[in-house]
Amino acid sequence: MSYEKWIKLGLEKGLEDLQIFATRNRSLKLTIYQGRIDQHVESDVESVTLRGIYGGKITSIKFENTNTDAIETMIDRLISNAKALTANEPAIIFEGSESYPEVKVESFDFTRVPIADKIQLAKDYEAGLLGQKFVKQVQSTTYQETENETTLINSKGLKLHRSNSFAYAYAIGVFEKDDDIKTAYDIKLVKDYSDFNLADMIQTTLEKGWAKLGGSSISSAQLPVVFSNEKFGELLATFTTIFSGESAYRNLSPLKDKVNEAIAIEGLSIIDDPLHPDAYFQIPFDDEGVATAPMNLVDKGVFKGFMHDLKTASIFKEAPNGHSFSGRISTTNMYVQPSNVGFDELIQPIENGIYITELAGLHAGVKAVSGDFSLQAGGFKIENGNVTTPVKMIVLSGNFFKLLNGITGIGSDLKFGLNNVGSPSVFVSSLSIGGDDSKAS
Amino acid sequence: MIDKLVLERLIQEGVSEGADFCEIFLEDTHSNVLRVTGQEVTDTSSSNVYGAGVRLIQGNDEVYGYTNHVDEASLEQIVHNLKVSFDGPKMDAKPLGDSQPYDPQVKIPMASKTTTEKAEKLLPLTKIMADHDSRIVQSIASLMDMKQVIKVANSDGVYQEDERHYARVIMMAVAKDDTSMQQAYEGPGRSMGFEIFDELDVKTLAKETATSAITLLSAEDIESQVMPVILHNGFGGVIFHEACGHPLEATAIAKGLSPFVGKVGEKIGSDVVTAYDDGTVDNAWGRLSYDDEGRPTQNNLLIENGVLKGYLVDFRRGRMMGAKPTGSGRRQSYKFSPTSRMNSTFIAPGKDKVEAIIKDTKYGLFAKKMGGGSVQPATGEFNFAVQEGYMIEDGKLTRPVRGATLIGHGKDILFKIDRVADNLEFGQGMCGSISGSIPVDVGQPTIRVQSMTVGGAGGQK
């Protein structure tokens, strides 16, 4: 049954407006372990999110059973769910933006590459690591390709379509030196199969692993801290909800009532750019059909405003800015604006500090509401302006909102992570390091 | 779903060209999230996960395919796509047996209640939180309910249906004063229906959640140090889950990627530590009648008086290790091939009293409520966050502290447990691993760890 017919059915059942957001995801995943295929997974899944207004209330239902009789049941459940809502909040199905940004169509057909080649790529990746210095074994080597198609159609006449395809590969190396075991990997994501460069991938993984070996804890102290670009991006990603209009409306963001106030040092700008050329994905419209556009969240230290979906934009009496994804408000490609200060120059003034290259427990050790974070960390000492010996098993603690005012320097090495958050290296004047004296070198 | 005879034919097809094992997993899961914010119903969303996963194994090698198109032709196509990975003689699949009775553990199915009836159970909870203190600026109560219907059939003749009902009430309170904003939450879950509201004292928990958020306002950041830590019962068991549970899963053991490889029969902890992973605890969040490979769940002894007794084993990794499966094969949905996972994991109760343990601790941290954590099984390094903690000074709880994270090594921590109380309780969480996110219980009585690295932002000038 076509989506148009579903819309007709929904309207017949009494919905005032409705939208169908349908995705089709096809993927192939291969993992290699000790020269053999450990996992080989093929999938093809369609998923539909129906969003509808009944009695002036909007709600949604997501389902995978797209048989005709199931659709009726889903529409009925949507109506009963809408009836239970009591909050009087804007309920909007969107008629469409005036125009949509053009994005490069990424449609490389990974299925054209013979599967044997992909298996060989993963096998060669593993083999390239095994036998190298300190490599005890390779936990797993993964190749994955994904093809996504998204269709949005609604009763206001809007019809949008987007698609993308990509593949990535990584190998988790297990490194051992003097009873010290570390794992390391580096994910390489490509839009064209020929962009896999195995020699580089092996070298990067080895360097990451070797760098971690041989570290020790340090005594607890307050120290200057430099976050690697990847790790500052990961930390920032855990705080994206503070920029959400929904969080502000629900009294869950400390930035509520702080629009146009300074919240960070003047040198800090945080931008959300759905079209940034260095990011992994460029996104022309959000899940409600709103055109996306670059947005300054923090401009020279000043908080400029919240990300919105249709509902919160209406509540805040602002124009929607295209940030509704998977049923909540989120960033597209958020990043910290880099400077032109190179890494060596950035750390040059530090006599005694820590360079953070590992963070663990980000889902648990961060409180977005208070800004407090306390995380297992690892990295290197910085001594007299140089990165020196590895440090492991420390706890890095602080408050994100204080940190924003304690930034001493920002590097030039902007890098986007697979979480779609980008950052250069960031130097923070002082954070708390928890360690174990007895295990310090 | 698909007819038994059709499954039997497809399974036979699966083992016709070299695969020596074929399994088909069918799923139809419906879940609902209902949220009350303040005194308004603000979210009522539903979702349905529906599809089939096909798994073929030859020796230790596995291929897996899945789709939401649950019809004979689509599944046949998957079987054909997968079986070309193998080459070898045709095997005869065993005829499918009869599905054994299962216990859905539900008295009042959620489907028998309207969304409005459910909301009426949540509205008093947010009111209790909001009325607790004028500094509570937001109170949210959510109900997550899920009914998962599965069927699993394989070439060993297993044919098993199962129906799982989950209910979880999540409460969050946000407190704010001039200097900070703090959040606290509780999220009890059970394998139950609507009766969860009768069987759990959710109103008391709502009160405690609000109290916890208010306490955090006046708490100081803890100062980083190495010290004794008393981990309170219930969700405190997350320490064992992360530090030892994951490294005891065959997922890690079969590859030799765990500090506990080859240690069965050896001492891996102090004498006071006995631990189990039990899939059979009535109404537990982590309970299953049958695992996702169609095996009955069981109570697995992991550690007895400090000696390692066994691992958690799924079918395929059991083959690799030459070990018997322990009813621990689990997966989030048909989109994942199963692997060895925990159900309700806990440190068994001892004879000590909480009060005595605190009294005998001159200085340390009392971690009353834990947040989540993570572990890297290959290295055994784990971390977890303390949601609500108090300093212990001269055997007494003194000031509240916040922002503590505890880190350590799985192979050391069990030796450092020196006191175990008699007050076993479970806490509920979602556990993530290679076969997805699944409901599990973590549990323990109150325990003391002689020394741990505690990190926090306190002591800053």
Image (spheres, coloured by chain):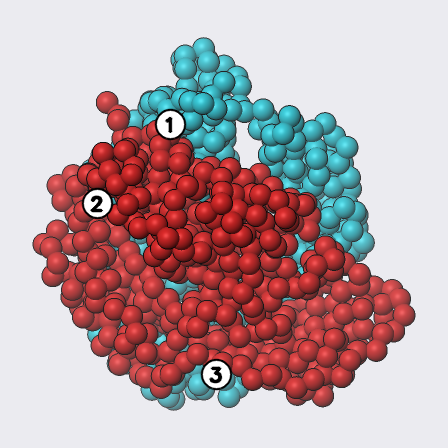
Q: Position of residue A410 (x, y in %)?
A: 40, 26
Q: From the image, tell me which residue sits under label 1.
A: A433
Residue at x 49%, y 34% (from the top left corner): A358
A129 sits left or right of B107 in the view: right
Chain that bears disc 2:
B
The residue shown at (53%, 52%) is B304
Q: Nearer the viewer, residue A10 or B88?
A: B88
Q: Chain B is which colour?
A: red
Q: Residues within 10 Å of mark 2 (few under 14, many from 20)?
A: many
In the rendered structure, the answer to whether residue B240 lies left or right of residue A401 reads: right
Tell me the colour chain A is drawn in: cyan
Three-letter amino acid code of the residue under disc 3: Ile
Front residue (pair B119, A117) = B119
At x 83%, y 78%, the residue is: B92
Residue type, mark 1 in image: Ile
Q: Chain of mark 3?
A: A
**Residue B183 disc label:** none
Question: Could you say whether the residue bearing mark 1 is in a helix, strand or loop?
Answer: strand
Q: Given this view, does label 2 or label 3 mark the residue nearer the observer?
A: 2
**Is residue B378 visible in the rendered structure shown here?**
no
Instruction: Compute the Cα span from label 2 to label 3.
Output: 47 Å
For marks 1 and 3 on the same chain, the one whose residue lies earlier in the sequence: 3
Q: Write down the quadrant of residue A297 in the picture.
A: top left
Q: Foreground residue, A222 or A125?
A: A222
x, y (%) of residue B315? 68, 64
Spot occupied by residue B307 in the image (x, y as percentages of width and height): 57, 48
Give the residue at mark 2: B216
User: Which amino acid type is marked by label 2?
Assistant: Leu
In the image, A53 versus B394, the foreground residue is B394
Q: Which residue is mark 3?
A: A71
Find the residue positioned furthest to the front. Answer: B351
* Furthest-left residue in this view: B134
